[in-house]
Image: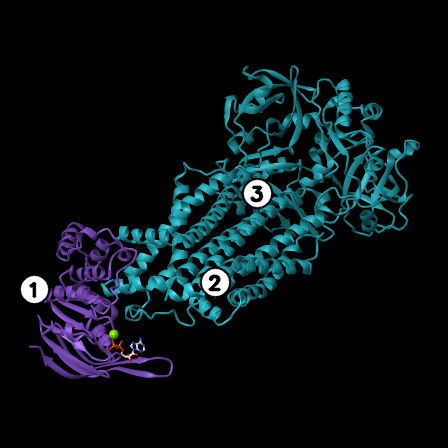
Amino acid sequence: MIRNYFIIAWRNLSRNKVYSLINILGLAIGMAVTMLIGLWIYDEITYNDYFTKSERIAQVYQTQTFNGKKGTGPAIPRPLEAAMREDYGNNFNHIVMSSWQQTYYLQNGDKNLRRDGHAWQNGAIDMFGFEIIKGDRNGLEDPNSIMLSENTAEELFGDADPIGKVIKVNSEHDMMVTAIFRNIPENNTFDEVEFMVPWQHYADTNEWIANALQHWGNNSFQMFVEIKEGKTMEEVSQLIGPVKYEKAEGEKEYDPVMFLHPMKDWYLRGDFENGENIGGRIENLWLFGTIGLFVLLLACINFMNLSTARSEKRAKEVGIRKTLGSERPQLVRQFLAESLFIVMLSYLLAMIMVQLSIPSFNELSGKTVEIPWGEPVFWICCLSFILITAFLAGSYPALYLSSFNPVTVLKGTFKAGRYASLPRKVLVVTQFSISVALIIGTLVVMKQIDHSKNRPVGYNKEGLIQIPVFSKDFEGKYDLMHEAFLRSGGAVAMSGSMSPVTSVWSNRSGWTWEGKQEGFQEDFAWVEVTHEYPSSMGLIFTDGRDFSREFASDSNAVILNETAVRYMGIKDPVGKLIRDEDTGEEAQEPMKIIGVVKDMVMQSAYKPVKQTLFVFSKEGNINYYNLRLNPEKSVKENLELIEQTFKTHFPALPFQFEFVDENYALKFRAEERIASLAAVFTVLAIFISCLGLFGLASFVAEQRTKEIGIRKVLGASVSNLWLMLSREFLLLVMLSLLIAIPIAYYIMQNWITKFDYRTNISWWIFISAGLGAIFLTIFTISFQAVRAASGNPVKSLRDE
Amino acid sequence: MIIQVKNLEKYYRTDEVQTIALNKLSFEVKEGEFVAIMGPSGCGKSTLLNIVGLLDEVDAGSFVFKGQEVAHYSERQRARLRKHNIGFVFQSFNLIDELTVYENVELPLIYTGVKPSQRRLQVEAVLEKMQITHRRNHFPQQLSGGQQQRVAVARAVVHNPKLILADEPTGNLDSSNGNEVMQLLTELNKAGTTIIMVTHSEHDAQYSHRVIRMLDGHKVTENIMA
Ligand SMILES: Nc1ncnc2c1ncn2[C@@H]1O[C@H](COP(=O)(O)OP(=O)(O)O)[C@@H](O)[C@H]1O
Ligand SMILES: [Mg+2]
């Protein structure tokens, strides 16, 4: 019986090549899109699956309240460790103190690499379950030990055995390689970690960390934990909530609440607002999941429409089969089997499409997904996917076609009733509403990205490079290098700063100033810079003056951005002082405001610029050299000159640099990826819809051949006929516009409010989406309409 | 008695008008009989055949098929009874275009659940008998009208039904092909199959035992053929 069904299906396919092509191609594209999205989602939800204990691992987070606004983040103070171990230790298998991701120079002989890694306590190895392929699992016990990734070990030592060898770290410390760990896979929080060093080493070699041991207000560290078996995240989270509040007298005003942020939420639900988790990347999962379903639905609608449109052709067969004793369920099964057959063919084509498009997909999405051929789960998913698609596409046509009455259809006068095409119209409107909404959505997202990209950044990011200078070798060399780089002719200006131009690494509070309101809980972005910073960046002064080497007192100078002036509520800020709230022995000297600059966008391009203090770096806390390339020379020449100069002074260190404008562009990468993926899917969705429209148009043209012939004989022109054939479809598409535009407007208006710096949803977006849809419709159906209208009427009339 | 029809009524309702297609029609057919139904176009012949063939519902009256009252049967019940007992031959052949001759003939056996090996034997036998074995792998459009109607007859009899209903089986055929089909039907009737045939042709009616003449939905005369 099944064989019989497939035979019929196959012969129907091969006899109606155009319909078959439209059906299979449409379904295949739809399925391919859905599969790619499926792979993407799978990759997202398996993020951090590398850690076998991911259900029990968490990071300790903290919510504090500043001026009534709750802020949440992973930064915790150092004394928390002792408090947690003493009072709550029995809830945890591991409590691990950790640095932020560090960039170190790792040197073995003449090989010197700059690599990212972590300083953390030995428990991290067992807790995260890093795979040690050589050496000692407890290799972080000794403060002067280091663990290397497979890759880094090979780069440093080649084929030689690295275990027990000593390498130079940051040109300063001799550290012994105690273990080699398996490279951490791509979709993992720690995928960039190439080395691990002991927490103790990190704490011992940095004075400020040692100083932080009793300092509850210095939130500069991270803590990872593994809760004991049998405990739940919620209960432990509750338990540790007040730990800081109870211990830290001076911090009570900020109402600190500690809690556990479970590993399974790190990647997908990393955003907090008002102390509450508000999701994060998970939104993109919903977004793409919805798009995937919609695209599949569009393809299924094509299938339904074409199958039911052609029902008059199948009606006779249904009639005969019923006469010969077939019951309706048998026919339903037959038609379902037929759609299963077509879906299977489409699936094969879709698999080929997916396989071929995976490289470009990965490039576009910044992922490294592949088809998991070996996973049984994958095949189960594929099978269910085929069945679900076949059912989705096939059930309506099956029920419709099998409902025909044999007596009526065999009389030979069967014509689908006047309302038979109503469901098809509804489906076409659905298709185009979805497509138009997708177009509008994509346009709004792109406009928003464009808008943020073109935001005035307050400095000149063109022709600016930054060189990271973390190593001890650079200490005290700033003035020397400043002179050398300028003299080389490769740079026309240079400055130093503690954080890169495109981010802020430090926030400070504990200041007071004239006119500060009682109880005001200030929080400033803190950027330490050299004299030349404002001039080399091209910051725009609105008040006061730049740092100057002429004034020795400028070692205590501070420059504010405009937001800071407004935030602090000072009038005539220049000349005023910002003082340490502490008045004791260790109080810092007051800082004198010497100037005000226009806001410089360093952090999120979507958010308002934070109140920022540019302070002169007294301690030479310089991590980056920022060089303005010489506009008279080519970039290549400049870079050669700069590299030569660098190598003359630091022959052992690798010369590495970043273009600031490229770094800035990275801020948009995630959004751009989402937008370009969405754009591709939208184009495919529209293509599928047009494919369906094309099929329907050819069906209608075919169905009305006789009518067209008669009208032509009676004198209708090609354009009369074109209008007659196109009008109905155009009306449907316009109806779709009426439905899609308000819905899309509502959704996107909602979406865009999550950006503080946002574009407006202009009318031209709707106009262009609407005109685009109408134009595409005309283009799609005109081919069929004109062909039918220009046929020879004699021929079509003789056919009857 | 294979068929007993009493006061049969059938109406068609379209938007405003109601047509009486069958009006208190009564007649009987004995097992093994060959009955011809004649009458002007639109008098209700096909409607009657569809009801007798268990394809259509009855609006009023009684219809006893092989001793069972079936007037109130549901579509599913009718389908079950139909597929084992009745074969149809139509004026326009009604073969499935996407199936070959062999597959078309095989269909009723599939629906009655005959095993594949048994199906093969039966189909081969009937193709042989209808002399279309050499056309078994052709599609209907590749055959002449006469050949198509022979396939249709083959399909109607392949599962050895008790009753064959033929609605103007020669209507689309020339006289020599028409005679051939009438010959086939006569042979089937001689072998014991009951046949009810609608026809416009007095010539074809000669082959039957009895002619029922209809007008406006009811029976006017009944003549036994010589
Ligand atoms: N499906 C239908 N809907 C409405 N009227 C119908 C339908 N089928 C048949 N009729 C009407 O019923 C009457 C009998 O039709 P039919 O049995 O086909 O006649 P015959 O086969 O004798 O030519 C005719 O008047 C015809 O118009
Ligand atoms: Mg008739």
- Mark 3 or 2: the one toward you: 2
Q: Ligand 1: give its quadrant.
A: bottom left
Q: Colour of chain B?
A: purple
Q: Nearer the viewer, residue A507 or B161?
A: B161
At horizontal 31% and vertical 64% (from top left) the residue drawn is A316
In the rendered image, residue A390, in percent from the top left (x then y), is placed at: 39, 53
Whether residue A703 sits left or right of residue A171 in the image: it is left
The type of colouring in the image is by chain
Mark toward the viewer: 1 or 3:
1
Q: Which mark is residue A208?
A: none
Label 2 Cα neighbours within 10 Å, binned few <14 / some 14-19 / many ≥20 = some
Q: State whether residue B172 is above or below residue A117.
A: below
Q: Which circle's residue, 3 or 2, is located before the other in the chain?
A: 3
| Residue that numbered label 2 is attached to | A427
- Disc 3 secondary structure class: loop
Q: Which residue is mark 3?
A: A267
Q: Measured along the vertical axis of the image, is residue A216 above or below residue B50?
A: above
Q: Position of residue A350 (x, y in %)?
A: 44, 45
- Furthest toward the right, the residue is A550
Q: Badge 1 sits on which subunit?
A: B
Secondary element at image label 2: helix
Tell me, yes or no, whether the two marked residues, 1 and 3, touch with CB atoms within 8 Å.
no
A505, above or below A308, in the image: above
Using the image, name the chain to which the residue with label 3 belongs. Answer: A
Q: Mark 3 belongs to which amino acid?
A: Tyr
Work out whether residue A312 or residue A664 is closer to the camera in this orientation and state it.
A312
Q: Residue beneath label 1, please?
A: B191
Residue A5: x %, y % from top left: 29, 54
User: Tag 1's secondary structure?
Assistant: loop
Q: Residue at x 63, y 21 (%)?
A: A144
Q: Which chain is cyan?
A: A
Q: Chain of mark 2?
A: A
